[in-house]
Structures are given as C-alpha cells and as structure tokens.
Image: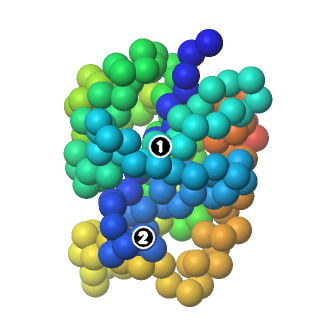
C-alpha cells in the first residue's frame, strides 16, 4: 500500500505561528489533534512529521521546517524517500487571491504568487499535484504583500479561521477517502 503525503505550508518558529502564511500548518495541527497524534522532528530532514491512518490509507502529515520558499526541497526529498507518486501528494496552503476563509480544492494548477508552491513546482518539476487553498485575501492596499502574509490574524479573522479549520480538515480526509473530484464537488461550492 502506498503512502500519502499531506504537506502543510508555513514558516517555522513561534514568530510565525499565528500568521496568515502558516494556515497550512494550522490545518495539519487541527487534523493531528483530531487523530490524537503528535508531530515529531525528523533527524535526516528539516521537517516535522505525524503518521496516521485515514480510512485504510497510511498518511504522513508533513510540516517543512525550512522557510516557505524552500519547501520544495523537503517535498522532493520525502517523495523520493517514501516512493510517493504525484497522485499521492496533497499540498495545503494560504492563498491571497481567494477571499478570506474560502476553501478551494484543485487537482493541479499554477503556483500563482505563492513562493512555497513555486518551490514545490520547481523541485518536483510538476504542477500536477492536488491542493487545498485557504483564502487569506484580499490584501489591504496600504500594506505590502510581505506584511500581509506574515501578519498575524486579527481577532475577527481568528474566529473565521476556527470555523473553517474543521471544514479544511474534513476536506483533507475527503480527498484521501473519496478522491479530489468528489471533494471539489462538495467543498468548492461553500
């Protein structure tokens, strides 16, 4: 049975823990809590990993501990280590081009402006991986993109995040159990 890799994108360290750019980490943390599992640092690679089962599938939840724009190196290394096919890869990340709190599931696509996804596309030489995007937009005109994505959630945004996290974890599980097409039909309409 093949292993499925679910990668949440974010930046390591407490300084970035509650930033918009770390929503991928937050979603995986929520799933790990639901599954009652803990993340552990791997010795051979800059990543935190939690192992679980979703249905009958073996799943590795991954939080790269390199900075966002080097996430692809970790993904490439672990895909090779565990002989993971591109069909068994799911990337979970923030998207400034989606309205705040909106989930969007896709089979494949471009990296857009997201440096973490650009790094993955470059490292694995493919855009054909499943993804769950969590909207963190729109950016206010008066602040830079960097300040927006690396800014902390406001109190109001935090309430929305808490409500959407459960839907996002359900979407992750649905992709593993039911496939991306059924999951897109279910969650992209919300």
- Report the label total: 2
User: In front here: 16 or 43?
Assistant: 43
Using a 10 Å C-alpha cutoff, classify the residue at mark 2 as few (fewer than 14 neighbours), some (14 to 19) or many (20 or more).
some
Residue at 76% of width from left, 29% of height from top? Answer: 55
Using the image, determine if residue 150 lies above or below residue 104: below
The residue depicted at 65 percent of the width and 78 percent of the height is 159
Discs 1/2, front: 1
Extreme-top residue of the structure: 1
Question: Residue 116 location in percent, x, y?
Answer: 30, 47
Q: CA distance from mark 1 to mark 2?
A: 17 Å
Identity of the residue furthest to the front in this view? 43
Where residue 58 appears, as percent x and y from the top left, is 63, 26
Tell me the tag on residue 17. Answer: 2
Q: In the structure shown, which secondary structural element does the residue marked by tag 1 occupy?
A: strand
Seen at 39% across and 63% down, the residue is 21
Q: Which mark is residue 188?
A: none
Q: Horizontal placement of 155 versus 11: left or right?
A: right
For the question of whether residue 35 can be seen, the reply is: yes
Note whether 55 is above or below 145 in the view shown: above
Query: Which of marks 2 and 1 precedes in the sequence?
Result: 2
Residue at which label 1 appears? 49
Which quarter shows the N terminus?
Answer: top right
Colour mapping used in the image: rainbow
Query: Counting other residues with Cα less than 10 Å from the Cα at mark 1, is it few (<14), some (14-19), or many (20 or more)?
Result: many
Towards the viewer: 133 or 17: 17
Residue 137 screen position, x and y as percent? 45, 67
Q: For the residue labelled by badge 2, is the local secondary structure a helix, a strand or a loop?
A: loop
2 vs 152: above or below? above
On the question of residue 184 being in view, the answer is: no
User: Pointer 1 and pointer 2: residues touching (CB < 8 Å)?
Assistant: no
Q: Which residue appears farthest toward the bottom when viewing the image?
A: 155
Residue 103 at x, y percent in the picture: 60, 53
């Amino acid at each position: 049975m093949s292993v499925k890799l679910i990668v949440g994108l974010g930046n390591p360290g407490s300084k970035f823990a509650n930033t918009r750019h770390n929503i991928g980490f937050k979603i995986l943390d929520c799933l790990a809590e639901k599954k009652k599992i803990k993340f552990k640092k791997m010795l051979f690679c800059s990543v935190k990993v939690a192992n679980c089962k979703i249905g009958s599938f073996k799943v590795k939840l991954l939080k790269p501990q390199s900075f966002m724009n080097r996430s692809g190196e970790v993904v490439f290394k672990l895909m090779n280590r565990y002989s993971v096919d591109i069909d068994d890869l799911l990337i979970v990340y923030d998207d400034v081009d989606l309205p705040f709190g909106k989930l969007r599931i896709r089979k494949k696509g471009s990296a857009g402006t997201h440096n973490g996804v650009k790094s993955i596309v470059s490292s694995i030489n493919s855009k054909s991986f499943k993804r769950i995007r969590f909207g963190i937009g729109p950016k206010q005109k008066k602040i830079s993109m960097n300040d927006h994505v690396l800014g902390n959630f406001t109190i109001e945004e935090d309430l929305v995040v808490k409500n959407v996290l459960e839907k996002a974890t359900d979407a992750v599980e649905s992709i593993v159990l039911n496939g991306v097409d059924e999951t897109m039909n279910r969650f992209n309409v919300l």
